[in-house]
Amino acid sequence: MKDFDYSRPTSLQQAIRLLRKPGAKAVAGGTDLLLQIRQGEIQPSLLVDISELAELHGILAVDGKRVRIGAVTPLRDLETSSLLRRRFPALSEAAALIGSVQIRNLGTLGGNLCNAAPSADMAPPLLALDATALIAGPNGHRSVRLDDFFLGPGKTALARGELLLALELKPLPARSGCSYQRITIRKRMDIAFVGVASLVVLDHDGKTCRLASIALGSVAPTPIRAPKAEALLVGKALSRQNLEAAATQACQEAQPISDLRASAEYRREIVKVLVRRTLIEASRRALATET
């Protein structure tokens, strides 16, 4: 492991200036980054500690409608947030699946996403919820749909000197429900070899699907949406036949590989199972919001 410098900026602009230096890496919780450094996967020349920047903290309701989650907010805060449990429970549930309580107290939402691992547990529910990434850099602020944030394994849309400020979520329509489920070899302290999040918005009759969103993790170079599967559900009842058709289509949109954890064929089958399960749970939750 090579030596590196360390700096803890006191302002966002100072952090951006430091991150423009060649070999600079942002760090907050460090649960992924420090392991990668020890294993020699990356060799930074400078670690920029952004954990104390106020702009990157907290779970806030904005204008009483949108919800903004700071990038360095610990995963444990997402797990226990009453605001998220009430409005976006799938996010709290996904956060609760990551590592141990100790890891969740250190690990951050931004770290989980900026690591750009295809298996990142927070990515599928945020994709299904159509989250927006808020980014700051040398040229000011910009926003990117999360669909466009992941470019490949370990690669994001962040340019040199940019950092992820927050994730922003729009309010869900009435009769909405979202569910995230995953499959791992062990129940805890393990990486998902398939993760699926589904969002369902029901029409006024409580039966017809007005909007569907299906996001897949660990089955492509990046977390992805399954738009063709989503389209099969819009305007239709969530019958067993229609759910099966959507699950089969999502399986075809997946691009899994075989590795030590699971074969590509098995991953495809698990996609079908989890798409069905999450759609059923999401529709149950959508109906529950009416009562």
Image (tube, rainbow, N blue to C red):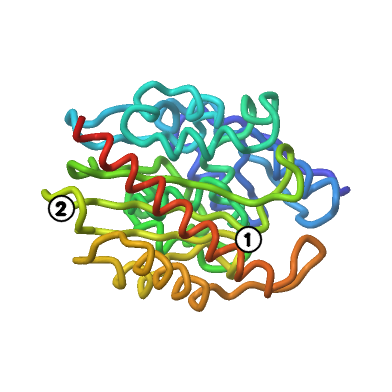
Q: Residue beneath label 1, please?
A: 154
Q: Residue beneath label 2, please?
A: 203
- Find residue 242 and report its horizontal and vertical position in percent: 34, 68
Q: Are marks 2 and 1 in contact (CB under 8 Å)?
A: no
How crowded pointer 1 is (Cα within 10 Å; few <14, some 14-19, many 20+) is rated as some
- Find residue 34 and report its horizontal and vertical position in percent: 75, 41
Residue under the image location 33 percent in, 39 percent down = 285
- Find residue 85 and report its horizontal and vertical position in percent: 39, 28
Residue 250 or 83: which is nearer the viewer? 250
Residue under the image location 27 percent in, 28 percent down = 61
Q: Classify residue 176 by image quadrant.
A: top left
Residues under labels 2 and 1: Cα distance? 39 Å
Amino acid type, label 1: Gly
Say whether residue 121 is left or right of residue 81.
right
Please say whether residue 110 is visible from this viewpoint.
yes
229 vs 177: above or below: below
Residue 220 or 135: which is nearer the viewer? 220
Q: Assign a secondary structure to mark 2.
A: loop
Q: Classify residue 97 by image quadrant.
A: top right
